[in-house]
Image (cartoon, helix red, strand yellow):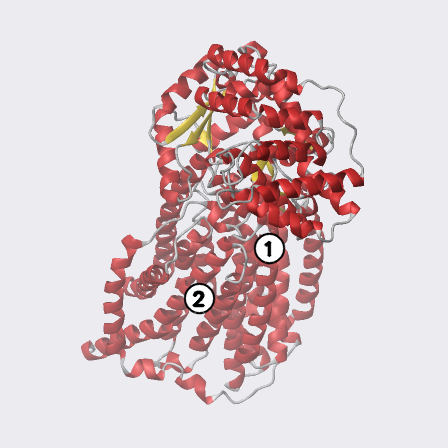
């Protein structure tokens, strides 16, 4: 630094120290105004899709699709499950009707299975062989249907079972369908005895291939978003849950409601991010405070540092509200980053001030010397950190670009306050002079004793770490960043694992239905595509043959299903008598060949020992409650007629063709996409045929490619800008290399550590390398510049700089490490990888770099004349 510049710095430092109280008052007033502005204007946006630039092709495709079909933007998927399909469908129908009537919270509701059209024509959508099998089964069940249609009660059930058992010999096996029905009844009796919610599903009891899992129905709703809320979809989701509770969709009625879909995933992710960020902020504050107590050893110095940090954080939040207006799932971590990084500047100044004060200088001269001593390296460090953050701004990754803008501004604010407000606070909170602790003089003694061994080991480890670079993996799936225990994530995974309910579908916007059909045909030829749908897919195939089977079935069982004068409901005495006859009938058939009858007999015997009148009425309801629904549905299904495009209901047509004539194509994968590789293969296969395709598989894979590109672009940009800045300031190639060498080594060590620990790069922690370039260089700058500042080689080890570098890194590690406890896996991985990176940087800066400097000085002394 020239003498003229030195005099300017001294005068500026003296002015700051002399006007300390005024600067403090102005800073506090500014912070109060900033806080009042930030609180109402800073919102949180949880959309992962919005974190990529809208100019990227896959984003443009998605925007075009959602503009054409807005009802499919950020839906909530209500998943209703239960043991009885009839009850599940009734609950889904009731919920869909209730939500459709709530225009204040829901813009659209979709429950295709609840359409009356499908209740009438549902048999036409079965495969021809499936319909033939069902017809044969229903024809064989004529006696059962006749008995129960005439008397849908325990009395009618007992009459039918007695007749069916009497037709066979005592030792003969019952027809499999009948024994299966008796076994299903046994399950219901056992559930009532165990006080569990379960009813008999007559539909499943009559099927040979009934599934073992719970029945499931999906109601898809488009919530109305409150853009001014921190949780925009929360009111709609709360209204949905309240409506479900009112309708009895709960465990007490044998039903379960779970929510997923983009809006539900975003809401629960927001909650996990906020709780994780809040916990991280608390842990960071606690850890940083404890480290300051250890490192500074003075309540006055600690208070001044923390006050500066708090005001800087408020000003940075106000800048974020003013410049961007929102925080995304990554930029919300700016507070933790600011605490961890902003305190570094204060530590360097405070320890330099303590060093000058303990050396015998007066309070004012010590402060001026501290500002003058750390001003240049602190400014260079702040600029390098800001450049590391800003390197993401030109990329398509808006999520990190916004974090970069906020954090870069935070670095400038922290630098400015560290050289103004912090000295002003120290001028009013004077520390007392003390004797320097002896360990300060020997912090690097062990390192400087064996520089050749340290450098040699570092070179070997660096070369070995090169082999880790090709092994670094990138996980492009944002679902893997969310809390895996949240309801929305668990439900999403359950749907994705089932081909019938897979949510990993792709969609294409076509100009017309004819074009949509052509696209569907091309996509259907791909091996990775299992099914394609357009509006035309809802016109059943083989209608003539199917209608013939339906007419034949209507002739056989239609008269049995006609509503007539049903028998009056039984009283308790009749129920008791019916149960007694039922128990006798199944006991007579309870042979080894009839396991269903055997279990039913045992359960009935146990039930009848202490059954009360309410228990008998409850059992009747459990056994026959779904029967009227089955009979009514059969009666309606037998009324099916020919279906053409014009016969499809308007509510269905609107989901597939919009008023402008644009049509929707949906393609589902051939196999469940439970891993990244098949997910990417499915997306690539669809894009190869139709580049306009959109949907979750394409969005996540294309976003992954965009992030990888942004990562590479930002890393090279950060390295180039930082190198250029160092060249302009240091002006010596050797000094530039001395600053960058430990940084390169830290990058290699971080990569090797990630591979060894099985850590993958993802949407959140991809910031590590550009950030490490900006932050890792800071300690090296302080060490190199202080080494050159001291007259004697190695004298730097006895100054406050190594201690400041150590405690700065420790506070940064404490801050980033606190993110690792977050339930949000993205934040946790960011915290863990940043902790590893800063730890590697610390080792390289305080162990390897001083050893290199010592060897360079030895060489210089030997070559000196």
Q: Residues within 10 Å of mark 2 (few under 14, many from 20)?
A: many
Q: Residue 443: x, y in percent?
A: 40, 82
Q: Residue 304: x, y in percent?
A: 62, 72
The front one of 464 and 847 is: 464
Q: Residue at x 67, y 32 (%)?
A: 159
Which labelled disc corresponds to residue 282?
A: none
Answer with the quarter of the image where residue 740 lies: bottom left
Q: What SS does tag 2 mark?
A: helix
Q: Nearer the viewer, mark 2 or mark 1?
A: 1
Left/right placement of residue 529 relative to residue 326 reads: left
Please determine whether, in this image, residue 771 is positioned above or below residue 679.
Answer: below
Answer with the quarter of the image where residue 616 lies: top right
Q: Residue 22: x, y in percent?
A: 69, 66
Please determine whether, in this image, residue 567 is positioned above or below residue 499.
Answer: above
Please determine whether, in this image, residue 732 is positioned above or below residue 663.
Answer: below
Answer with the quarter of the image where residue 854 lies: bottom left
Left/right placement of residue 775 relative to residue 661 reads: left
**Of callouts 2 and 1, which one flags the residue occurring earlier in the amino acid sequence?**
1
Measure the alpha-carbon separation of dots 2 and 1: 22 Å
Left/right placement of residue 583 relative to residue 780 reads: right
Q: Tell me if I can see residue 395 in this picture.
A: yes
Report the residue marked by disc 2. 377
Report the residue marked by disc 1. 316
Q: Residue 609: x, y in percent?
A: 71, 53
Q: Residue at x 47, y 38 (%)?
A: 498
Q: Tell me if I can see residue 325 in this picture.
A: no
The front one of 227 and 70 is: 70
The quadrant of the rendering that contains the N terminus is bottom left
Q: Do the numbered discs 2 and 1 sit on residues whose CB atoms are within 8 Å?
A: no
Q: Residue at x 58, y 13 (%)?
A: 555
């Amino acid at each position: 630094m020239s003498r003229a510049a030195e005099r300017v710095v001294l005068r500026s430092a003296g002015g700051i120290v002399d006007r300390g109280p005024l600067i403090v008052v102005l800073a506090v007033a500014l912070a109060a105004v900033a806080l009042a502005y930030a609180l109402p204007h800073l919102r949180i946006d949880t959309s992962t899709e919005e974190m990529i630039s809208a100019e990227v092709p896959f984003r443009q495709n998605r925007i075009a699709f959602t503009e054409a079909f807005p009802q499919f933007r950020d839906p909530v998927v209500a998943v209703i499950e239960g043991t009885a399909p009839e009850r599940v469908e009734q609950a889904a129908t009731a919920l869909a009707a209730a939500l459709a009537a709530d225009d204040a919270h829901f813009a659209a509701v979709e429950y295709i299975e609840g359409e009356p059209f499908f209740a009438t024509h549902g048999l036409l959508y079965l495969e021809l062989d499936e319909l033939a099998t069902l017809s044969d089964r229903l024809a064989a069940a004529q006696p059962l249907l006749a008995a129960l249609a005439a008397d849908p009660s325990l009395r009618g059930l007992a009459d039918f079972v007695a007749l069916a058992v009497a037709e066979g010999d005592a030792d003969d096996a019952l027809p499999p369908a009948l024994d299966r029905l008796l076994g299903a009844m046994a399950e219901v009796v056992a559930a009532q005895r165990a006080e569990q919610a379960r009813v008999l599903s007559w539909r499943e009891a009559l099927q040979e291939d009934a599934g073992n899992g719970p029945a499931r129905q999906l109601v898809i709703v488009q919530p109305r978003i409150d853009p001014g809320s921190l949780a925009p979809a929360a009111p709609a989701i709360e209204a949905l849950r309240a409506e479900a509770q009112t309708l009895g969709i709960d465990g007490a009625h044998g039903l379960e409601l779970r929510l997923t879909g983009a809006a539900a995933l975003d809401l629960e992710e927001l909650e996990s991010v906020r709780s994780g960020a809040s916990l991280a902020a608390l842990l960071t504050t606690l850890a940083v405070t404890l480290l300051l107590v250890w490192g500074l050893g003075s309540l006055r110095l600690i208070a001044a540092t923390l006050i500066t940090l708090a005001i800087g954080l408020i000003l940075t939040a106000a800048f974020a509200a003013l410049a961007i207006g929102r925080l995304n799932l990554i930029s919300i971590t700016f507070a933790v980053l600011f605490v961890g990084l902003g305190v570094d500047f204060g530590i360097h100044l405070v320890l330099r001030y303590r060093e000058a004060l303990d050396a015998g200088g007066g309070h004012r001269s010590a402060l001026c010397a501290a500002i003058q001593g750390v001003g240049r390296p602190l400014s260079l460090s702040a600029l390098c950190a800001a450049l590391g953050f800003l390197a993401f701004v030109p990329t398509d990754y808006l999520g990190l670009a916004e974090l970069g803008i906020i954090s870069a501004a935070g670095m400038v604010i922290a630098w400015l306050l560290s050289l103004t407000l912090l000295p002003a606070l120290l001028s009013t909170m004077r520390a007392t002079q003390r004797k320097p602790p002896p360990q300060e003089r020997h912090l690097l003694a062990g390192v400087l004793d064996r520089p050749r061994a340290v450098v040699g080991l570092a070179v070997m480890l660096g070369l070995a770490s090169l082999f880790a670079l090709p092994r670094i993996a990138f996980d492009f799936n944002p679902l893997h960043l969310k809390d895996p225990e949240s309801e929305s994530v668990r439900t999403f995974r359950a749907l994705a694992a089932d081909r019938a309910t897979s949510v990993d579908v792709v969609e294409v916007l076509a100009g017309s239905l004819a074009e949509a059909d052509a696209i569907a045909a091309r996509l259907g030829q791909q091996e990775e595509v299992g099914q394609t749908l357009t509006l035309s897919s809802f016109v059943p195939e083989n209608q003539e043959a199917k209608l013939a089977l339906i007419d034949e079935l209507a002739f056989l069982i239609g008269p049995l299903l006609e509503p007539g004068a049903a028998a009056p409901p039984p009283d308790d005495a009749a129920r008791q008598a019916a149960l007694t006859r039922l128990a006798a009938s199944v006991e007579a058939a309870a042979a080894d060949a009839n396991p269903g009858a055997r279990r039913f007999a045992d359960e009935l015997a146990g039930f009848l020992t202490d059954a009360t009148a309410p228990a008998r009425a409850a059992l009747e309801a459990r056994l026959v409650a779904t029967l009227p629904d089955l009979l009514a549905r059969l009666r309606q299904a037998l009324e099916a007629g020919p279906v053409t495009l014009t016969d499809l209901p308007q509510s269905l047509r609107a989901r597939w063709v919009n008023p402008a004539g644009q049509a929707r194509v949906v393609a589902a994968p051939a196999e469940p996409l439970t891993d990244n590789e098949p997910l990417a293969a499915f997306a690539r296969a669809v894009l190869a045929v139709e580049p306009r395709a959109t949907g979750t598989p394409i969005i996540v894979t294309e976003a992954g490619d965009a992030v990888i590109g942004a990562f590479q672009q930002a890393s090279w940009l950060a390295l180039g800008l930082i190198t250029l800045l160092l060249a302009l300031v240091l002006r010596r190639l050797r000094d530039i290399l001395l600053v960058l060498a430990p940084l390169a080594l830290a990058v290699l060590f971080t990569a090797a550590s990630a591979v060894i620990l099985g850590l993958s790069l993802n949407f959140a922690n991809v910031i590590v390398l550009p950030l490490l370039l900006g932050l890792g260089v800071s300690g090296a700058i302080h060490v190199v510049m202080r080494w050159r500042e001291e007259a004697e080689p190695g004298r730097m080890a006895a100054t406050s700089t190594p201690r400041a570098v150590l405690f700065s890194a420790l506070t940064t590690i404490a801050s980033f490490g606190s993110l690792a406890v977050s339930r949000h896996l993205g934040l946790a991985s960011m915290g863990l990888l940043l902790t590893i990176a800063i730890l590697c940087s610390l080792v390289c800066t305080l162990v390897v770099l001083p050893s290199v400097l010592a060897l360079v000085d030895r060489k210089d002394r030997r070559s000196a004349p």
